[in-house]
Image (cartoon, rainbow, N blue to C red):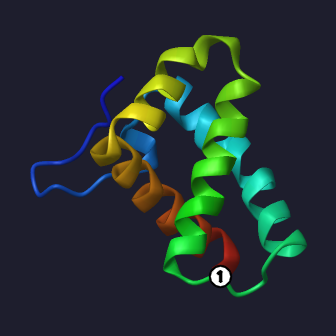
Amino acid sequence: MDLCSTGSGKMKLTDQNQLICDIFKASFPFLRASIVTYHAFPDAVLTGTFILRALLAATSHNPNASHICYWILNNHIYLAKMITLVCCITRFLDSL
């Protein structure tokens, strides 16, 4: 499932398919748990690992998301785009 971006290359959660939005929303509790449990101030590599695990956990809880799990595991560009969206959304939620 492709991620939607604007003409300038920017991606917004509101532009994504509903299944993608559900996966992102479901990944936040897993991501927060990783930060609280393992490392409160992760570096860039550890942050990517936390997000990968959170996205995989979120897809495993959604029976319609098996193809998205496949893309996350097998397409590094797709994963990088998803990590970018999760990082931006997480920063916004933390500012509230």
**18 lies above or below 5:** above
Residue 96 visible in rendering: no
Residue at the left extreme of this rendering: 7
Is residue 40 something that shows in the picture?
A: yes
Across and down, in percent, residue 46 comes to: 60, 72
Residue 23 image position (x, y, % from top left): 61, 35
Judge left or right: residue 56 versus residue 16. Answer: right
Seen in the picture, residue 43 relative to 36 is either above or below; the reply is: below
The kind of residue on which mark 1 rests is: Pro
What x and y, as percent, mark residue 26? 72, 40
| Residue where numbered disc 1 is placed | 42
Q: Residue at x 57, y 51 (%)?
A: 52
Left or right relative to 63: residue 49: left
Q: Residue furthest top?
A: 64
**Front-lying residue, 75 or 85:** 75
How many numbered marks are there? 1
Say if 39 sits above or below 33 in the image: below
SS at circle 1: loop
Residue visible at 72% across and 54% down in the picture: 28
Please state, as top left, top right, bottom left or bottom right, where the N terminus lies in the image: top left
Please identify the quarter of the rendering in which residue 58 is found: top right
**Among the 4 quarters of the image, the one containing residue 25:** top right
Please give left or right for residue 36 compared with residue 78 in the image.
Answer: right
Residue plotted at (30% across, 28% down): 2
x and y, in percent, of residue 62 in the image: 70, 20
Q: Name the quadrant of the C terminus.
A: bottom right
